[in-house]
Image (spheres, rainbow, N blue to C red):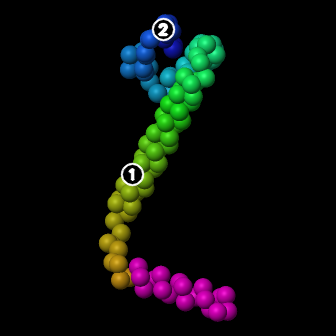
Amino acid sequence: MIPETRWSAGSHCNGAERGSTDDQHKGFATSAIEPKLIERLKALPPNRVAEVVDFVEFLAAREERAAAAQKLADGLARLDASNLPPVIEDEVEEELQAERRERRVRQGA
């Protein structure tokens, strides 16, 4: 069950204070407080609404970065678990040059 939050002027409440998990918070944000937030936004002057929009965009970007970092960490863990031999820079360069030669041949250059 999602805890109820009472909004008052100057109140700040985060997931830890409510004791909710991220999944609960996502459902809570879209169902229980959405009408309250819209009501509060309508009461703000335009410059404050712009600040809210900027902050929401900042939070979304932070979440995207965190998700990308986790995806990278997961990929690196899988790569490490594969026990492949280390990559040698000269071998990479050799493969790259070979691929470029093959591409030129295919393109008729």
Count the marks.
Answer: 2
Q: Nearer the viewer, residue 100 or 83?
A: 100
- 57 versus 4 height, above or below: below
Q: Amino acid at mark 2?
A: Ala
The residue shown at (61%, 13%) is 43
Corner quadrant of residue 87: bottom left
Q: Which residues are magenta?
A: 92-109
- 46 versus 73 height, above or below: above
Q: Amino acid at mark 1?
A: Ala
- Of circles 2 and 1, which is in front? 2
| Residue 101 forms part of the magenta stretch | yes
| Residue 25 picture location, percent across and down | 50, 23
Secondary-structure class at tag 2: loop
Residue at the disc numbered 2: 9
- 84 versus 103 height, above or below: above
The residue shown at (33%, 78%) is 88
Q: Residue at the right extreme?
A: 108
Q: Nearer the viewer, residue 77 or 91?
A: 91
Residue at the disc numbered 1: 73
